[in-house]
Image (spheres, rainbow, N blue to C red):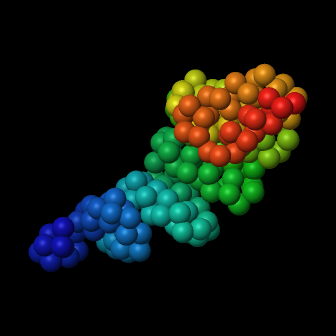
Amino acid sequence: MDEAIRLEPEYYWSYETRGYVWRHRNDIQKAIADFSEAIRLGSDESEVYESRGRLFFDRGELDKALADFDEAIRIEPDAASGYVQRGRAWFVKKEYDKAIADTDEALKRNALLANAYKIRAAAWHQKGDYEKAKADYTEAIRLEPTSAYSYRSRAQLWELKNNLDEAISDYTEAIKQGAEINDYIRRGWMWYQ
């Protein structure tokens, strides 16, 4: 990629491609720099904005991430992924209604996005609407049955409803899919009760 850039330094695609390489190698700073240069040179691909936005998100720069997700959606409003990523950023900012609105938009475009259901479920959970959260976690599990996170999160909702058998079942499944120490602790506590 370096040679391609040396030969034609104003060609945005070379920077964009190298940005993906840097991202794959976990060199976030270089990836952001190359995505930024691709954008400066005229790239109008939503994926570039979304990729840079994800990197900003990973660094905790949520306002920059949101700006990039906004631009990705502006460029490609029918793509679900920009809405999912922006919904995730809104969730982290504790803007739960905005997170729900964006995941709703994502799911209108693609109803098979387990991550959209997970984000929306977590937002419903934070808002105290446990039934909607449980329904979304259940759908996420149907779409992605290996998600320990979804089982664990739904188990917590069962606990809140004092439905210990269902909570134990979901903690057990979370353990099968990728245990965390708290899954064992919570399940043990359920058995104790």
The C terminus, quarter of image: top right
Which of the 4 image quarters holds residue 25? bottom left
Q: Is residue 87 above or below residue 165?
A: below
Q: Is residue 75 above or below residue 119?
A: below
Which of the 4 image quarters holds residue 42? bottom left
- 77 vs 173, left or right, is left
Residue 166 in picture, x, y percent from top left? 76, 23
Residue drawn 43% across and 58% down? 51
Observer-nearest of 4 and 122: 122
The number of callouts visible is 0
Q: Is residue 22 above or below residue 132?
A: below
Residue 100 in picture, x, y percent from top left? 70, 43
The N terminus, quarter of image: bottom left
Residue 107 visible at all = no
Residue 96 in picture, x, y percent from top left? 75, 50
Residue 15 visible at all = yes
Residue 187 in picture, x, y percent from top left? 74, 34
Residue drawn 46% across and 56% down? 50
Observer-nearest of 97 and 24: 24
- 176 vs 18, left or right, is right
Which of the 4 image quarters holds residue 105? top right
Residue drawn 59% across and 68% down? 60
Residue drawn 41% across and 74% down? 29
